[in-house]
Image (tube, helix red, strand yellow):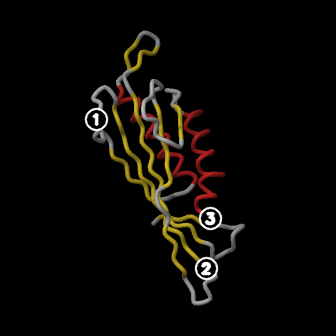
Amino acid sequence: MIVENLFETIIYPQIKEYVEQNSIYNPTVTKTMPQESKVFPIVPTKLLPVTNQYNNLSYGEETYTFGIEIDVYAEDKTINNKKVSKRTICNEITEVIVNYFKVNYRVTIKVELDAPNVDSNIHRNNIKTTGKLDTKYGLDKLVIYPK
């Protein structure tokens, strides 16, 4: 529950605020993927399954391998009477997300541009971050590093 708690209370609120404030396209960052959406760009974010591992015989040190998957969906948009392509919007938001993780957590980041999507009117990029959360310095000084 350590990683889940960290995601819910720190990582997700921070990335939501960062992306919504730093992207010029005003994306909506959510924790769930809506079945249908009329709001674009939309950025569903979810924590992937977490694996723990004990690192010493006293079971006092644990590491947790975790991943976060973020999809960026956008459709063409008209801004100031100029058409902006869905690919341009997705790529700008993707850059903001990658920058957030590089600056704040330095986790492993895998970006799939032009990810397959069932709706040809909507463009999709996929970002997967993976890292390890280490408890060797105690629960009040958690360390996150690349996996």
Q: Residue at x 45, y 60 (%)?
A: 130
Q: Residue at x 57, y 44 (%)?
A: 15
Q: CA distance from mark 2 to mark 1?
A: 44 Å
Residue 129: horizontal and vertical position, in percent?
45, 55
Quadrant that contains the N terminus = bottom right
Residue 60: horizontal and vertical position, in percent?
64, 82
On residue 49, the disc is none
Please give the residue where the numbered disc 3 appears in the rendered image. Answer: 2
Mark 2 vs mark 3, foreground winner is 3
User: Which amino acid type corresponds to the residue marked 1 in the rendered image?
Assistant: Val
User: Which amino acid type corresponds to the residue marked 2 in the rendered image?
Assistant: Glu
On residue 61, the disc is 2
Q: CA distance from mark 3 to mark 1?
A: 35 Å
Front-lying residue, 25 or 44:
44
Mark 1 is surrounded, within 10 Å at the Cα level, by few (under 14), some (14 to 19) or many (20 or more) other residues, namely: few
Asked whether, in this view, residue 58 is left or right of residue 108, the answer is right
Decide: is 13 above or below 2: above
